[in-house]
Image (cartoon, helix red, strand yellow):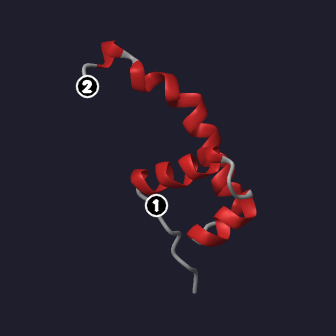
Amino acid sequence: MSKKRRQYSNEFKAKVALAALKGDETTSALAARFEVHPSMVSQWKRELLDNAAGIFDSSSGK
């Protein structure tokens, strides 16, 4: 019997990524605190940094 993959909300991913950007804790400590794999913390942090400029894009209409 296979396990179902956990799906995380965008709000949760943003919360973890922002905590990683602060740099107060190590990736391993953050992963333990949020109960995710350390590679997920790194991936979400990288995605936040790559897509941060899009937040200020006024042509998106949001």
> Which amino acid lies under the numbered mark 2 shown in the image of this protein?
Lys
Q: Which mark is residue 32?
A: none
| Residue 22 screen position, x and y as percent | 62, 46
Can residue 25 be seen from the camera position used here?
A: yes
Q: Secondary structure at mark 2?
A: loop
Does the residue at mark 2 contact the one at mark 1 (Cβ under 8 Å)? no
Residue plotted at (59% across, 29% down): 50
Which of the two labelled residues, at mark 2 and mark 1, occupies the earlier sequence position? 1
Mark 2 burial class by Cα count in 10 Å: few <14, some 14-19, many 20+? few
Residue where numbered disc 1 is placed: 8
| Residue 51 screen position, x and y as percent | 52, 29
Which image quadrant for residue 1?
bottom right
> Which amino acid lies under the numbered mark 1 shown in the image of this protein?
Tyr
Q: Secondary structure at mark 1?
A: loop
Number of the front mark, 2 or 1: 2
Lateral position of residue 27 relative to residue 55, left or right? right
49 is higher (above) or lower (below) than 25 = above
Inter-mark Cα distance, 2 to 1: 23 Å
58 is higher (above) or lower (below) than 18 = above
| Residue 5 screen position, x and y as percent | 53, 69
Q: Residue furthest front?
A: 24
Residue plotted at (66% across, 65% down): 31
Q: Which mark is residue 62?
A: 2
Residue plotted at (48% across, 48% down): 14
Mark 1 burial class by Cα count in 10 Å: few <14, some 14-19, many 20+? few
